[in-house]
Structure formats: C-alpha cells, structure tokens
Amino acid sequence: MPEGDTVWQAARRLHLALAGRTLVRSDLRVPALATTDLSGRTVLDVTPRGKHLLMRIEGGLTLHSHLRMDGAWKVYSAGDRWRGGPGHQIRAVLDAGDRTAVGYRLPVLELLRTTDEQRVVGHLGPDLLGPDWDQDEALRRLLDDPGRPFGSALLDQRNLAGIGNVFMAELCFLARVTPWTPAGDVPSPERVVAAAQRLLEANRERFDRTTTSTAVRARSAHRLYVYGRAGRPCLVCGAAVRVASETHGRTGRERPTYWCPRCQSGPGPA
C-alpha cells in the first residue's frame, strides 16, 4: 500500500503537470462519473492529505482519489506511450494538452464540492507531511487506547495520517518493540511520533525509501531494517527477521508484518 511519502510524490507530480492548465479532455471511467466532463476547467492545485489525493478544479470542485493497495497516477507528455497498465485498468484520463495524467486501478475516485472535502478527509489525524502536523495531538490519539497493539495504532489514519505497513514495521523496530506490544507499554512513544514525522519528511523526495542509519548503509547498503527481509539476518543483531501474515480488517487482504525477535521485545502475533 502506498505510504504518505509516495502519495506526497504523486501529488507533486500531478500538481507540476496540471496546476494552472486547462483540461482539454477528461474521461472518468467509473460508473458514477461516466457522464462527467471536466474539459474547459482549470486545475487549481493537487494536495495530498495523508494517503488521499485532492485535485481542486475550477468551479469549486475536487476530484478525490485514494490509491489503497494498487492504485497509481502516471503523468505522460504528448506522444508518450502509456505504460501504467492495460487499458481496462484506467479509471481516469485528464488531458491538459502537453501533459496527460492517467489514473490506474483507482479504488476510490469521486467528484465532490471543494467545500465538502472534510466529508472524506475530516476523520484523519494530523498529517505527517501536512501543514496541520501537530505532534502532541498525534501522540494523544495514538495513546488514546493504551491496550491496542502499537502497530495497529500506527496504521490507523485517525491517529496520524500517512503511515503504511513499511513505516509501521520500521518504526516498531526503531522503538525496539514488536508491533503487537500494547501502545501504553511502548517506552518514549513521543520519540516514535517524532521519528515518524522525521522519516516521512526525509523520504518525501526519495524514490529509494530509507530508514537505516548512515553507518548501517555504509557496511551493508540496506535501506530498510526489517521490512521485506524475512529470514535474512537483522542488520543490528544478526538474528533472522521474522514475518507474520495478518488480515487487514477493512479490506480483508493479507498484510505481512516484519520484526526482529531479538531486538524487539513484547508479544508476538496472535
């Protein structure tokens, strides 16, 4: 699932390609928007909010999308071959003449009044990459249910917006607790929240996501401590990194959770 830094990058690409330009063609390939035509309207800006993308369009409209597991926005210059996937996966085409934005596999695509944006993002906690970032409020929300597994609390966008499975695993490793440790038992949770904001800020302009220290990269070149490294040696202690498969409650999809059994203390998977 794309994380806050990936969504921020997508918003920036879309903003640079479309903001200030008038659409010469639009094709929204979802049933609810099949007859909607945005051509002739100017794109005002594209703003990320957590993992949501808000494309504001002349006339008080916002095209809201969410990438979830597989969605992607691609930007092409005139004459480019579209390579984001087969045609039947295209959900949106926004053509501004010299630039065209194409949305693939978008599970959420809806048009709403800009004044109604809070209906789709108002539930989110402080945005780790947004102007509303509030570390104290994020910490309060994160610890509101002290018995909740810390990994689950980090992934809950109502607590702090922008963390996905990669950053969750890496933050738990840096905190030296398993993702199943009760949130109230995590030592110095304020440091975890600060690290979350620092990591997303550092990665928002990187395409090779990095959480490891300079010293670790100097001797191993690895950019992540545990995510995606099941069965391989921990970069700190050498123990084999473990992985557990869990079902994501909202989507029903399996989600891998990685941790080091030696470096991270606390309960394991149920």
Image (spheres, helix red, strand yellow):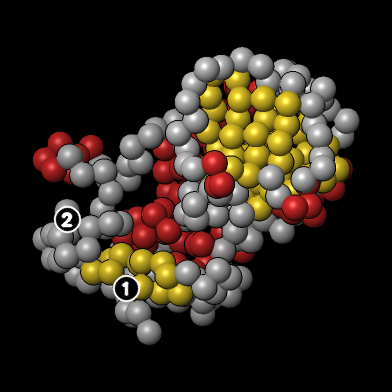
Label 1 belongs to which residue?
244
Q: Earlier in the sequence, mark 1 or mark 2?
A: 2
Give percent across and percent down for residue 64. Answer: 71, 45
Say whether residue 243 is left or right of residue 141: left
Give the vertical position of 66 relative to 210 (above or below).
Answer: below
What's the distance in space between the residues labelled 1 and 2, CA to CA? 20 Å
Count residues near mark 2 (Cα–Cα under 10 Å), then give few for <14, some for 14-19, many for 20+. few
Q: Can you say which quadrant of the picture contains the C terminus? A: bottom left
Disc marking residue 141: none
Can see residue 128? no
Viewer-nearest of discs 1 and 2: 1
Q: Amino acid at mark 2?
A: Val
Q: For numbered disc 2, what is the local secondary structure?
A: loop
Q: In terms of depth relative to the viewer, which is nearer, 110 or 192? A: 110
Give percent across and percent down for residue 108. Answer: 66, 53
Give percent across and percent down for residue 245. Answer: 35, 73
Q: In terms of depth relative to the viewer, which is nearer, 88 or 226? A: 88
Label 2 belongs to which residue?
236
Say whether residue 191 is left or right of residue 139: left
Say whether residue 131 is left or right of residue 207: right
Query: Residue shown at 28%/49% (left/top)?
Result: 224
Say whether residue 212 is left or right of residue 156: left
Q: In terms of depth relative to the viewer, which is nearer, 264 or 95? A: 95
Query: Residue shown at 49%/43% (left/top)?
Result: 86
Within the image, what quadrant is residue 26 found in? top right
Query: Residue shown at 39%/33% (left/top)?
Result: 206
Count residues near mark 1 (Cα–Cα under 10 Å), then give few for <14, some for 14-19, many for 20+. some
Q: Amino acid at mark 1?
A: Ala
Within the image, what quadrant is residue 14 found in? top right
Query: Residue shown at 73%/26% (left/top)?
Result: 25
Give the vertical position of 115 relative to 172 (above or below).
Answer: above
Can see residue 146? yes
